[in-house]
Amino acid sequence: MLADRCSAEDFLPLLLGLLERAGVTAADTLLGLGDGAIWTDNIFEHLQAVRITDVYHACEYLDTVTSWCFALIQTLGWDEATRAKQRRSWYRGEVDARDWLSQHLPDVDVWLAWDEDTRMALRYLETRLDSMAYAHSKEKNYPIGSGQVEAMNKHVIGTRIKRSGMHWSETGAKTMASLRAQTCARYSLIDFQHLRHAAYPAPA
């Protein structure tokens, strides 16, 4: 939603103010966990955050690469059980994408013959290798997946707002989302506008 309304550069000052208000300092390590979207990556770059590509998104692209090309599976000598085992290794954060692709990717003349969707999936992986060092991230106890946040959003917001036949105005959806969040929260919520104005007080 934010990406549709403002650029990463316009949003960054607000985010910096909120981080400052939260007590984040230059000595802290910031982790940027996302799906690889350019807008989000620009934010992470400005913040000098350690970027981690969500492992579940990465595995969707990995599935496209390994499931489309039967010739690839034959070349690697995989059966379905081996392919499933490799996929579990990714999900568990047992691999680093750069090492994995260097071991398993076929020669250029093979993957250039793949269809466009599969080559796009491969490009997605190849351009994010630095942020898919999952085994290294696990060693540092960094999160590699956004499943908890997405599941929380589905449980807290989605199950209430996305019921059959429901239609919402923007104001109504925001109000209901706030009510649901407060109902499910352990602690009292801090109003975003209050936090924003605390970070950026109005000039005297």
Image: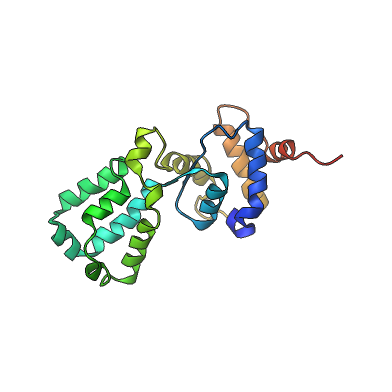
Q: Residue furthest top?
A: 187
Identify the residue shown where x is 51% and y is 43%.
Answer: 49
Q: Is residue 49 left or right of residue 78?
A: right
**Who is closer to the viewer here, 54 or 17?**
17
Q: Is residue 175 above or below residue 65?
A: above
Q: Is residue 192 left or right of residue 155?
A: right
Find residue 184 and report its horizontal and vertical position in percent.
54, 33
Find residue 39 and report its horizontal and vertical position in percent.
54, 55
Identify the residue shown where x is 52% and y is 38%.
Answer: 30
Q: Residue furthest right?
A: 204
Q: Is residue 48 left or right of residue 112?
A: right
Q: Is residue 169 visible in the rendered structure shown here?
A: no
Q: Is residue 13 above or below residue 138?
A: below
Find residue 1 and report its horizontal and vertical position in percent.
58, 55
Q: Is residue 7 visible in the rendered structure shown here?
A: yes
The image quadrant where one finds the C terminus is top right
Badge count:
0
Q: Residue furthest front?
A: 27
Rendering quarter of residue 137: top left
Find residue 124 and report its horizontal and vertical position in percent.
38, 59
**Who is closer to the viewer here, 35 or 101?**
101
Q: Is residue 32 left or right of residue 17?
A: left
Rendering quarter of residue 175: top right
The colour mode here is rainbow
